[in-house]
């Protein structure tokens, strides 16, 4: 999961060269399947088969002991999904809370990391810039480092006696105890009112009041947001940078001769040409942020007050800690649907308009 | 002139934000607990101390490191071999169903790994591979992205290089092994680095594929250490030293191959 950003899926395929027009040889066919055998066996055993098994578990009452296919395990239909989406109770409330938290996480991280990565790539693209290799290394290094190691560093930086608060003190600000503060920042912006407006507190969705839905990310979640933006910007910066290097300079020069300002050239000339890369960065960003797990596992395990709980972590903890395997699997599939839905919406929003 | 000066100032400030945490990490690893608490901003210790490294050496840390090395190296070797075999077959060998297989590989990469967290555990359990090196290694031996990178590379190799070997009667395996593979260094290096870095930094799979503390890797071991297995106190110097040590191998790989890495990683991204 943590490695998603560092192993980008390269879109588009080069056309097959030189293999057309010749009759397949039997020898090549046998060799082909032989060459593919290890890959197909591993992918089949650990990707395809698991998905089918999990689909079964998500509609069963398996509790983790024995085989999920033994006769004692019963088919319960949509019960696990209903507990998460329809039936009032703690399960539904926790799931809604995790979706809210992750929603704010995506809302903050994806635009920030994309804009920041694009900005750094544009700066590094300047031909006159000295020390380009140094800056590139500095910005990219966090991306290659283990998310566990980085999380440990941030745990120290954002601890109540840590570096960030010590720096804030220089400006006379008393920093919060970051990872222990469950207050939502939108609530804080309103002065953290004790009595929320009853119209918002009285009604809600999925067992969570509108007031809670609108809390904003908690202070603790904000630390994780900073951490992830800091870590992932470098990788995306490099994608934008590679794309910028491949743009034909003549288009930009033509705009320059026509008297376009730097700002106009960026919005009208450079950015439209970067659309494929932008699409790739946003897609990888959305897929990655909806699955945030490593940082939550190391830093907070969903605490404080469930405000850093995410569906990925909830899916893990429901199964491996709570032994509610059906529910854990159901959460994973719901998360999968969320990711697919977001990718489709984004594809539609960024489509080429003719 | 003034504008350029401002640009550099901004860039240096951002670079400082990226480097400073690592400096703090390095310094704090050599601080005492009290020093770390009292001077969290200082990127050097008031009084040097290497006691945390001794503590780590006495703990399970060497065992975790050995596991990480063993698991990552095995996975990396396996991925390089299997990815290039599969990439070659998908790029060059003609057989019925090749395009369907390629489509399936792409579809499988697109499945979010978090969806596979529980299912992988189920399969490992059913196969009796839970809590074993085999269970930690085998599921990671193949990665779709690596197959993809290798296929993309083989697509760019002109077919004529293989023709001579083929006329001489060499079979597909021989052609692949002694003609095409030696030419594929850039792609092989890219896949090697990505595989090593990916398997070294992997966390969720090592959490769900084992339970035995003796099988902890650095990622799962340090994660458990951070969540308070050492009992009272913050012990930040100890945790940061552990994090520092686990960063060293990827840092070496990164700086040694830096140029090739940053080029190879995103080759063809924008085509």
Image: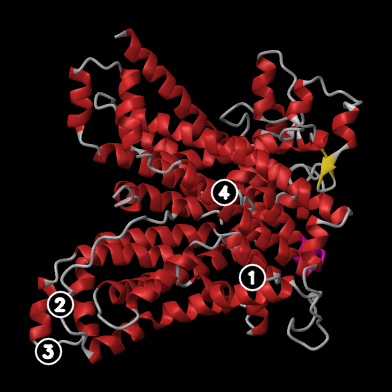
Classify 10 Å Cα crowding around label 1: few (below 14), some (14-19), many (20 and above).
Answer: many
Which chain does tag 2 point to?
A
Q: Quadrant of residue A29?
A: bottom left
Residue A342, which numbered label? 4
| Residue B28 in sight from this viewpoint | no
Q: Which residue is mark 3?
A: B169
Q: Are marks 3 and 1 in contact (CB under 8 Å)?
A: no
Which chain does tag 1 point to?
B
Q: Residue at x 52, y 31 (%)?
A: B20
- A269 left or right, relative to A55: left
Q: Which residue is mark 1?
A: B215
Which chain does tag 3 point to?
B
- CA gap between label 2 and label 4 equals 41 Å
Residue B227, which numbered label? none
Classify 10 Å Cα crowding around label 4: few (below 14), some (14-19), many (20 and above).
Answer: some
Classify 10 Å Cα crowding around label 3: few (below 14), some (14-19), many (20 and above).
Answer: few
- CA gap between label 3 and label 1 equals 48 Å
* Residues behind callouts 4 and 1 on a single chain: no
Q: Are marks 4 and 1 in contact (CB under 8 Å)?
A: no
State the SS at label 1. Answer: helix
Classify 10 Å Cα crowding around label 2: few (below 14), some (14-19), many (20 and above).
Answer: few
Q: Are marks 3 and 4 in contact (CB under 8 Å)?
A: no
Looking at the image, tell me whether mark 2 or mark 4 is earlier in sequence order.
2
Which image quarter holds the N terminus of chain A?
bottom right
Residue A256 vertical placement versus A118 (above, below): above
> Is B232 in front, or is A5?
A5
Which image quarter holds the C terminus of chain A?
top left
Residue B79 at x, y percent in the picture:
41, 70
- CA gap between label 3 and label 2 equals 20 Å
> Is A274 in front, or is B235?
A274
Residue B165 at x, y percent in the picture:
11, 81
Q: Quadrant of residue B78?
A: bottom left
């Amino acid at each position: 999961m943590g490695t998603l950003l560092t192993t980008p899926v390269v879109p588009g395929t080069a056309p097959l060269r030189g293999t057309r027009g010749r009759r397949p040889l039997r020898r090549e066919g046998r060799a082909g399947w032989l060459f593919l055998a290890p890959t197909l066996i591993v992918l089949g055993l650990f990707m395809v088969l698991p998905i089918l098994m999990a689909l079964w578990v998500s509609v069963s009452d398996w509790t983790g002991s024995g085989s999920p296919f033994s006769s004692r395990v019963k088919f319960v239909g949509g019960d696990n999904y209903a507990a998460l989406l329809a039936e009032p109770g703690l399960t539904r409330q926790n799931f809604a809370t995790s979706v809210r938290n992750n929603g704010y996480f995506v809302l903050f991280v994806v635009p920030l990391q994309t804009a920041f990565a694009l900005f750094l790539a544009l700066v590094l693209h300047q031909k006159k810039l000295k020390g380009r290799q140094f800056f590139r290394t500095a910005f990219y290094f966090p991306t290659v480092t283990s998310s566990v190691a980085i999380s440990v560093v941030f745990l120290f930086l954002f601890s109540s006696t840590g570096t960030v608060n010590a720096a804030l003190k220089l400006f006379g600000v008393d920093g919060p105890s970051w990872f222990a503060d469950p207050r939502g920042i939108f609530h804080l912006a309103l002065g953290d009112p004790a009595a929320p407006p009853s119209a918002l507190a009285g009604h809600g969705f999925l067992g969570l009041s509108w007031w809670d839905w609108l809390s904003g990310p908690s202070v603790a979640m904000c630390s994780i947001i900073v951490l992830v933006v800091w870590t992932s910007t470098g990788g995306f910066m490099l994608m934008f940078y590679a794309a910028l290097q491949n743009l034909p300079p003549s288009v930009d020069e033509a705009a320059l001769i026509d008297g376009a300002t730097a700002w106009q050239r960026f919005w009208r000339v450079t950015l439209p040409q970067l659309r494929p890369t932008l699409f790739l960065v946003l897609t990888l960003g959305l897929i990655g942020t909806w699955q945030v797990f490593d940082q939550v596992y190391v830093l907070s395990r969903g605490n404080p007050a469930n405000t850093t709980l995410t569906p990925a972590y909830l899916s893990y903890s429901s199964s491996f800690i709570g032994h509610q395997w059906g529910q854990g699997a159901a959460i994973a599939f719901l998360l999968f649907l969320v990711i697919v839905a977001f990718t489709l919406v984004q594809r539609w929003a960024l489509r080429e308009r003719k | 002139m003034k504008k350029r000066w401002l640009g550099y100032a901004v860039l240096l400030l951002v670079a400082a934000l990226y480097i400073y945490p690592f400096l703090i990490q390095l310094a704090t690893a050599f601080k005492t607990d009290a020093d770390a608490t009292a001077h969290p901003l200082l990127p050097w210790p008031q009084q040097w101390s290497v006691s945390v490294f001794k503590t780590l050496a006495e703990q399970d840390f060497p065992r975790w490191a050995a596991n990480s090395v063993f698991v990552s190296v095995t996975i990396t070797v396996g991925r390089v071999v299997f990815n290039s075999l599969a990439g070659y077959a998908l790029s060059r060998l003609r057989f019925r169903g090749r395009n369907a297989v390629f489509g399936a590989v792409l579809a499988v990469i697109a499945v979010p790994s978090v969806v596979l967290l529980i299912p992988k555990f189920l399969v490992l359990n059913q196969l009796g591979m839970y809590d074993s090196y085999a269970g930690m290694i085998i599921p990671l031996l193949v990665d779709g992205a690596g197959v993809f990178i290798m296929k993309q590379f083989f697509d760019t190799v002109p077919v004529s290089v293989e023709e001579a070997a083929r006329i001489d009667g060499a079979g597909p395996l021989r052609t692949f092994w002694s003609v095409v593979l030696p030419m594929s260094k850039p792609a092989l290096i890219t896949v090697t680095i990505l595989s090593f870095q990916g398997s070294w930094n992997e966390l969720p799979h090592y959490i769900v594929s084992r339970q035995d503390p003796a099988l902890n890797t650095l990622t799962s071991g340090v994660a458990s250490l951070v969540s308070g297995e050492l009992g009272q106190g913050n012990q930040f110097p100890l945790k940061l030293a552990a994090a520092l040590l686990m960063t060293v191998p990827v840092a070496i790989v990164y700086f040694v191959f830096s140029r090739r890495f940053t080029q190879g990683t995103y080759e063809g991204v924008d085509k």
